[in-house]
Structure formats: C-alpha cells, structure tokens
Image (tube, rainbow, N blue to C red):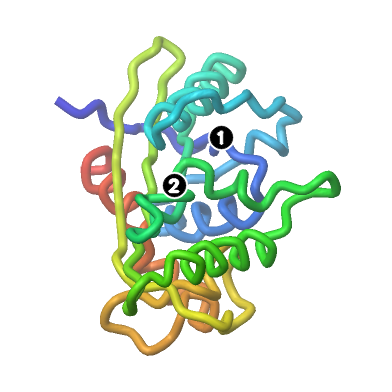
Amino acid sequence: MTRPFTGDRLIIATHNRGKLEEMAHLLEPYGVTVIGAGDLGLPEPEETETTFVGNARIKAHATAQATGLPALSDDSGIEIQALNGAPGVYTADWAETPTGRDFILAMTRAHDELEALNAPHPRRARFCCTLVLAWPDGHDEVFEGAVDGRIVWPRRGDQGHGYDPIFQPDGHDLTFGEMDRWEKNRMSHRGRAVQAFVDACFG
C-alpha cells in the first residue's frame, strides 16, 4: 500500500536549480510548496551507488533525516544503446571538469564515442528518471519514468539542460533542447515519474 503524501511542503533533495524549477512547476496544481535542499544549506551527499534508485535513495533519506520532513529526490540520466547504456548513472560525471560541469563537453564525448564505434543510425537512447520519496522514519516509495528517442548531431536548441540538445524524443521533430521548456516538462522522463508519484500519493 502506497503511503499518501498529506503535507503542503515538500523538500526536494537537489542543489540543481533547473530540476527544482521543473519539480515546482509539475507540482504546482497540487498546492504543494517545494523547497530545495540547497536553499536550506544542506550538504550534497556523496552518490556512491551504481543505479538510479540507489543514488536517489541516498539523497532522499539524507534530506528527510536532516529536515524531519518528507523529501523527494531525483536521479536521472541518459542511456545510449550503442554505448551499452552509458553514460547512465554517470550522466553528470561525464560533464565534470575542474571548473564545474560542462555539458557541451559531455555531449561531444557521447558523439565522439558513437563515431568511434561507427554506430548505425538511428542511434537509440532513452532518458530515465527515478524518484524516491523518503520519510524521516525511513519509509520510502519509488517512482520511475522514461522517454525513448535518438541521439542527433550537431546539437540543436538551447532550452532545457544537460544532454537535451542531442536528444530527439520519438514522435517529435524537435530535440528537448528546441522544445518549449514547459511543453518538454510535461512529457519528459521527469514529468512521467512525477505523474506516477502524484497518481500514487495524491489519490
């Protein structure tokens, strides 16, 4: 039995401003005020797991314990079929540089590795999102969403964030980087995972 969410404030276990804004927009119709872990000055826990759900659990439980409130975390990434699912849970790591994250570098790496393999077109990929809602007593619920598509090159669009400019979802002519941000938000992997959360916990 899924535990319902009955509060009016939800802590989002992220320091990523883009993710926080997307979550706030998706949850706005339900009268929930979202607060980011970064806004509360909480440290970012080290993500030591090798799965989306493992890393999401680390973040959600750390935040719930620190605040005494339910906390929702997101771990997401892109899985490229010809790269055996890489970068997957290391999606953000591919962008790490000594001076911060550089997603142009990460997207270029993905393209270069596909080229080195002479991977056939269409180059299939999917964005995955796992949400974990954790309570201070240790209970948690898991919700997942995914959207399939293909990798395109060169990059197209400057909307969204991360690998959005090289991902074209099935059934659409635009990349995530070319779509209106809120249109993309409704049908994205994160949008689908949030809808699963809403359906289960706000019913």
Q: Secondary structure at mark 1?
A: loop
Which class describes the residues within 10 Å of circle 1: few (<14), some (14-19), or many (20+)?
A: many
Give the residue drawn at x 38%, y 40%.
Answer: 131
Q: In the rendering, at what x and y percent does residue 31 appear?
A: 44, 50
Q: In the rendering, at what x and y percent does residue 133 appear?
A: 39, 31
Which class describes the residues within 10 Å of circle 2: few (<14), some (14-19), or many (20+)?
A: many
Horizontal side of 129 relative to 12 (left or right) equals: left
Give the residue drawn at x 33%, y 71%.
Answer: 149
Horizontal side of 128 relative to 13 (left or right) equals: left
Q: Are marks 2 and 1 in contact (CB under 8 Å)?
A: no
Q: Amino acid at mark 2?
A: Gly
Q: Amino acid at mark 1?
A: Ala
Label 2 sits on residue: 88
Q: Secondary structure at mark 2?
A: helix
Q: In the rendering, at what x and y percent does residue 156 appear?
A: 56, 84
Residue lying farthest to the top in this orientation:
137
Label 1 sits on residue: 13
